[in-house]
Every structure is written in C-alpha cells, then in structure tokens.
Image: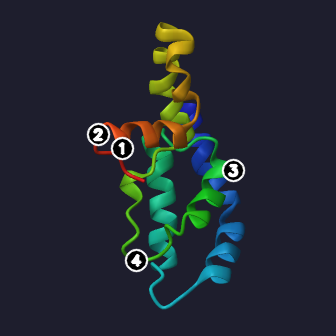
Amino acid sequence: MVRKTISGHLKLKRGREKIRELYEATRREDSKPFTQVIRELHQWVSTGKAFPVRMLINYYFQFRLQYEGADSSGYVFESEWLKYAHPLLQYAGNECAVLNNKDSAWHVFVRQGLPVPR
C-alpha cells in the first residue's frame, strides 16, 4: 500500500500542469485556492481511497469539488466502494447484484431510509 501511495503522489506531481489547466478552465469567484485543491488531492491519495489517480483528477473537477462549500467527505471512490461491495457480492451472489452499481445502491439505501451522501 505504501508503494501505491507514493506512486499516487508522484502521479499527482506529474499531473500538476493538467490540474492547473482544469483549475483555470473552471475557475470562479467561489473557487478554492489552487494550493488547497492540490492539498485535497494529495490527502485523498494518502488515505488510499482515491485510486486510480488518473481518474481522481478528472472526477475532482467533474463533481465540482474545487468550489468553496463542496463537501468532498461524502464522495466515495470506486476503489473504496469495491472494497466493501466485493465481499458482500461474494457472500450473497446474485441476491446483492444491486451493489454492482453505486447509483442503484444509492436509490435502494435512500428508499430504506439509510443516511447516504449523494
């Protein structure tokens, strides 16, 4: 896991120019400072949740997490989702097929009254 984390930090460092381009292209009055954006991306890589890194950069801007007030704590990365969904799928088989899709699972959980972030 340590090698993967170090590799992720290096990928972010190499992708800094792409991050800067995306930041400038989407910049508004309520944008977080660029240094904070970089810090958040590195923090996600450090937690080990945000892999693959090449997708992390695009998702960060796609979901508008670069703006003030954006709650990034509720975002679940695919790698983290699979960490929990995979054992359940192995255990329950086809009966837990809803876990194959995060959106489908979200709708099921909301209908059951479970508190889940969007």
* Pick the front one: 116 or 39: 116
Mark 4 Cα within 10 Å, few/some/many (few <14, many 20+)? few
Q: Considering only vertical position in the picture, is 60 above or below 79?
A: below
- Identify residue type, mark 1: Val
Taking the image as shown, residue 33 lies to the left or right of residue 110, namely right
Look at label 4 and name its amino acid: Glu
Residue 50 position within the rendered picture, expressed as x and y whole percent measured from the top left = 53, 44
Q: Which one is in front, 45 or 115?
A: 115
CA–CA distance in space, label 4 to label 3: 23 Å
Find disc 2 in the rendering and name its residue. Answer: 114
Residues at marks 1 and 2, CA–CA distance in whole angstroms: 6 Å
Residue labelled with disc 3:
54
Which image quarter: residue 112?
A: top left
Residue 6 rendering spot, x and y as whole percentages: 56, 41
3 or 2: mark nearer the eye:
2
Q: CA distance from mark 3 to mark 2?
A: 31 Å
Point out residue 84 in the picture as x, y percentages from the top left corner. Answer: 44, 25
Tell me whether circle 1 and circle 2 mark residues in contact (CB < 8 Å).
yes
Residue at image location 55% in from the left, 63% down from the top? 63
Q: Please give the name of the residue rendered at 56% of the width and 61% of the height, measured from the top-left corner.
A: 60
| Real-space Cα separation, disc 1 to disc 4, in angstroms | 26 Å
- Of badges 2 and 4, the one in the foreground is 2
Q: Give the numbered dot on residue 68.
A: 4
Q: Nearer the viewer, mark 1 or mark 3?
A: 1
